[in-house]
Structure formats: structure tokens, C-alpha cells
Image (cartoon, grey):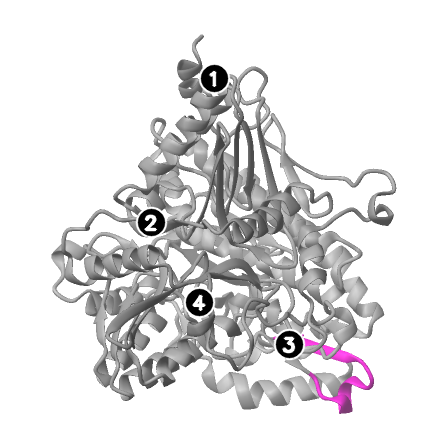
Amino acid sequence: MCDATAATEVALLDRDHSILAFNWRVLDWAQRPDVPLLERLRFLTIVSSNLDEFFEVRAAAHTTAARLGEAKGPYTAHSFEALSVAAHELVEKQYALYNDELMPAFAKHGIEIVSHGARTPAQREWVQEYFEREVRPLLVPVGLDPAHPFPQVANKSLNFIVRLGGKDAFGRENEIAIVKVPRVLPRLIRMPAKVSGKKTLLVALSSMVRAHLESLFPGREVGQFSQFRLTRHSDLAVDEEDVRNLRTALRLGLQQRHYGQAVRLEVSAGCAPYLSDFLLRQFGLPEQALYRVHGPVNLARLQQMIDLVDEPRLLFPPYHASYPGQITPGRSIFERLKHGDVLIHQPFERFDGVLDFLREAVNDPQVLAIRQTIYRTGANSEMMELLREAVRRGKEVLAVVELKARFDEEENINSAEILESLGAQVVYGVVGLKTHAKMLLVTRREGRQLVRYAHLSTGNYNPRTARLYTDISHLTADPKLTEDVESVFVHIAGQSRLPKLNMVWLAPFHLHRRLTEQIDAAGEAAAQGRDARIVLKMNSLTDEPLIRSLILAGRKGVSIDLIVRGACMLPARLGGLTDNIRVRSIIGRFLEHSRVFYFRAAGEEQLYLSSADWMNRNMLRRVELAWPVNDPHLRQRIVDECLVAYLHDDRDAWELQADGSYRLCKPADGANGGSGHGAQAALMQRYAAKSGEEGEGAWT
């Protein structure tokens, strides 16, 4: 069989199962005894939050196929069943860990979520007073009958279903009632010292409502009951070709998002079949979509517990990131860039360098224009305030706001409206494409010339996540690279024909083709017996044509290492097919987020940074950038810090096996005292500042 034929016939791994496998790797951090207890809880909540998004975005097609009994195509009743089995296994492991390890460990530290049965009389009195004052006024039980249909249940909200005995005030036997619990209420409440003593005692809102259900139905007998939580499909779909105002259309879509197609139902483990069957029928869900859980139906909301418990010893030691080493605080960044490019490796170096670059542009009277893409800047963003100040100072500000940044749509709409109200030029990218590129361009008058300065990044303009995600920021005054950035902004704003770019690869135009060409060039070099190497770091690898190209290059003899944090559909180490391809995933204290592409063919090296993962959507349905790092010293720094360090990680790395499973790497005997080498830990040590702002815990 020829190499090309073999490459096209290799069975790829399933994307959705690969996403679940990623969450198993995250869950491992919640199981590690060497991880501080509150951080273990944080990783547990991260898995729950990830699963929520998985069901909201990925599950609807499988669920529909199951309901219709589909037997052919990518989504079938079988695919739904297989995915449900895998998801149930992961959820069961989560709750076993929560009940059998984490909660007993917290109890040893005097930290408990106290159930109604375990509360003292004084504690019950305090809980009742809190319930009457803060909770009951917001609860409106609804008894179901023809005049009171089943209420709309919002996505991921806490609710109770109750089976009642006796008759209502009108003498009718309507036996089912629903109690919706408002989102505004905290899911955990800390009891005061007067009833908790020296311990940290918490009350779950669900336990509080459960304890007072009977008082919500005076004159009725409360029989069976259960808390429940419904997950709905929440990926916004707006026909951009058929709307006059995308912002208005998205606002309407946001209102409807909470009531999309039902895809998952969570209930208490003890929920009576009568009630769970009633809910499944109500929401049109198959039996496998029911998740019976031994604990709160929303583990993600236990993130509040980390904020309520004041125990620094149960958290990671604060990490003090250093100020970017290539920049001198208080000195002009523009002047620095005249002498060469600057790289900032976040979060090991602080995002402050990027903020200072924008701040200098805003305050400099010689700066005439600022252009920036806005994807996820976060609430109350300092960057947005700086852009607003730039408008106030009379600078020309162009903001390319991506309104369709999933689950950040509302924040971005609000930011766009504020900028527009001040006089900034705001555009919403390109119809049909999501603008995912991270670009900031400053135009400055210097004598009789206009000089451009740019910032490009693998990650978002979000100061908070910049302390939690690994990313590379690239500041440059390179005339050709900044000219490309300007051309991209003009193309997006004016929808003009894109000119030939000097250095940048741009999706959806030629990024995919350029990557394929680099892979093919390495393959041809290897086939001729010449040196060939590919090392790629990204978040996801699911684009089939690129995967097939990598498999073919590997068959020709290219040595390929892939560092893929999340979903990876390329099957590694298959005998005679992908022997030359190794895949590893790094899960650490910080979320791996940088995208680095290294190609070597016949002695020629190229290294690109990018905003894009290797997914079909990034290549064909988004505006994405990849740009070269040509300075040999900076290029070597990226190779050392983003590639070599991760390829030698034997503490936080997982290797993809031939059967599609992942195995945690083990350190060699005696290596680093037996604890192994962790790439993130080594970088933290390298860049740790003697003083500076504190970092945060694990990524969320």
C-alpha cells in the first residue's frame, strides 16, 4: 500500500470522546495528594464546567439522532449511547472523588458542608432565619394543572420537583409542583462563628430549600421530591446574511439561549423513578440523558467554596510573575522596539507589558491611531478603559469586536456600545466568519513619517486569564509585519480585496494551504533522506486534511512531535502507519494555550506563532493569523521554552497510546529527586520575581 493511500485510510479518533478524555486528564489533578486541597476542588469544578460546555455545544446532534433512531451518518443512536456511557463514567468518578476523598479531607481541616440532619438546633435556627429572610421571598412554587403548565426551566438552573398529597385550595389533586431557585442566590452560605465555633461550616442552598419544602406547600403533604438541573443546547446560531443588525440579532439570541433544546437532565441519586420519568417525558429526553448524582447537581458552583474558605495553606503558594525581561519599566516601549522585537511569555511574565504598550500609545500625543481586535477582554477590562480614553483624547480608534465569542457575547456587545457612544469606529468582523486573530496596531508620527507598532498574541486581551493561561505576546516594529497587520485591519473594516501579505498567513485565505505546504516540504525532504522535523503545540487537532498530511509526512520519515492539550483525532504510534508521530498533552497549574508551529526541512527552519488551533472552523470559518518569528535569539527562546521543555516534561505530560488512551508519563528513577521535570514548574522558577503582583490558583 502506498503512503498516500495508507494516510487516507487510517481511522481517526473520535473528537467527542477525545474531549472527554481531556477532562479525565484534568480530573487527575483533583486526585493528586500533592496538590493543595482547595486546588483539588478547583480542578473538580473545572471538569464540571467543561462538561457543561460540552453538553451545551456538542451533545444536541447526538441527542436528536437518538430520539429519531438514526442509524447512519456521524451522529447516530449508537454514537449517543457510546458517548453517554463515557460521560456517565466520568461523572460517577467525579462524585466518588467528591464524597469519598475531598469532603472527608476538608472535614479533617474543620471545613464542612453541613446537611440538615447533621445541624445542631442552633444551626437549624440560623438556617431557618436565613431562609425566611433571603430565600423564601424569591421562591414561587408552581402547582401543575391545565391553567399552570410546566414552567420554562432555564439552562443550568437549580430547580425542585415535588410530588404532593392531598388537595389544593380549590379541592383539586394536582400532585406535581415545581420550585425554581433564582440564580441570584449563592449556592453556598457560610454560617457565622456563633453557630459554627472555630470550624468553617457551610450550608448548600439546595439543602436549605429541601429542608423547608413543606413550608412552601401549606396544607399539602410533601411526598417524593428531588432537585434537578437541565442542560440545554446553547450555541448561538444567527443567520448573518439575513439580519440587518448583527448586534441586535445576537441580543435576541442571548435571551433565547437559556431555553434551547434539552440535552441532559441531572437529578439527585434518590430521585423516585416516577419523578425522573416525568421530567424525561417533559423534556423529550432518552433514558441515557438522565444523570443521577450523589451530591449537588452542579459541582461547578462549588467554586464558591474556594472563595468562602480562608485557608491560604490549602491553595497553591502565590506565584509572583516577573515584569517582561525585554522591557524596562518606565522607559518607552516604542523606543525599545526600534532596537528589536519583544516577546512576553505569559503568565510567567506579566501581561502588564502589553497594558503598558497600549497605555503609552494612549498617552503619547504623537500616536494618531489605534486599532485592536476584541474577542475576550473580560468584564471591567482595563484594556477597554484605555481604548475609551484614547477616544476621549481624540485618537482614531478602530475596534473589531467579535460579537460571537462563545459565552462572552453579552460582554462584547456592551463593550461595543460603549465605544460607539464615545465615537470609536466599531465593526463586527466579517459576515460568516468569526474574528479570532489577536492584533493591536499603533500608528505614530515620527518626524515626517508615520511609523507602525504592533502587538500580536496567541491568546486573548484579558488581564485575568493572562495570569492563568500560557500564551506568547509579540511586540514588533518590523515594517513588513506591521504592514501586514494594517492590511488585515483594512480588509476586515472595509471588506476590500486582501493584498499580497509579506509575512503573515491568514485564514480563511491561505493559512490552511501554507501549513499543508510546510508539512509536505518536510515529507519530501525526508523521502530524499534529508533532515526533516515537525514540532507543533496547540489546543486541539481535529482538521482531517491537516491530520492526513501529518500522517503522510510521518510515513515518509518525518519525525513529528505534537503537543496537543485537548482534543486530538490523530492516532499516534500505530504500527506501520503513525510510528513516527508522538502526541502528548500537558495539564498543569496553568492552562496551556500558546500555539507554536516549528518546521525543519533540509536544514531550513521556520517557526510560526498563531491564534489558530488546527480545527476546520479555525482554518475555514474564522479570521486567524500565523506569523513568523525571524529573530534567531527569540526563535530559540520559543523553541526552548514552548517546545523542548514540554517534550521533556515527565510530571504533567500524558502520552497518547496506540489504542487511543492516554498514559501519564513517569519520571526516570532518581530524576529530579523522583518528582520528575514539569515544564510549567521550571518556567515559574525561571521567571519568578522577587516581588510583584500575586498570581492566582489553577485555571478556570
* Residue 672: x %, y % from top left: 83, 48
Residue 88 place in picture, x, y as percent:
57, 44
Q: Disc 3 on helix, strand or loop?
A: helix
Read off the residue under disc 4. 337
Q: Which mark is residue 527?
A: 1
Q: Is residue 591 left or right of residue 233?
A: right
Mark 1 and mark 3: span between their CA atoms? 57 Å
Q: Is residue 288 highlighted in magenta? A: no
Q: Nearer the viewer, residue 440 or 299?
A: 440
Image point 36% across, 42% down: which residue? 61
Relative to 83, say whether 370 is above or below: below
Q: Give the residue at mark 3.
A: 307
Q: What percent of the width, then of the height, locates residue 50?
A: 52, 55
Q: Is residue 180 visible?
A: no
Q: Amino acid at mark 1?
A: Ala
Contact between marks 4 and 3 (CB within 8 A): the answer is no
Residue that badge 2 annotates: 504
- SS for callout 1: helix
Looking at the image, is mark 4 or mark 1 nearer the viewer?
Answer: 4
Circle nearer the N terminus (2, 3) = 3
Q: Which mark is residue 491?
A: none
The answer to the question of whether label 1 and label 3 lie on touching residues, with beta carbons closer than 8 A, is: no
Binning the other alpha carbons within 10 Å of mark 3 as few (below 14), some (14 to 19) or many (20 upward) gives: few
Q: Nearer the viewer, mark 2 or mark 4?
A: 4
Which quarter of the image is occupied by the C terminus? bottom right
Could you tell me which residue is drawn at 57 percent across and 70 percent down? 350
Q: Amino acid at mark 3?
A: Asp
- In the visual, does 43 lie left or right of 529? right
What range is drawn magenta here? 191-204
Lower position in the chain sequence, tag 1 or tag 3 = 3
Q: Are marks 4 and 1 in contact (CB under 8 Å)?
A: no
Sequence-first disc among 4 and 3: 3
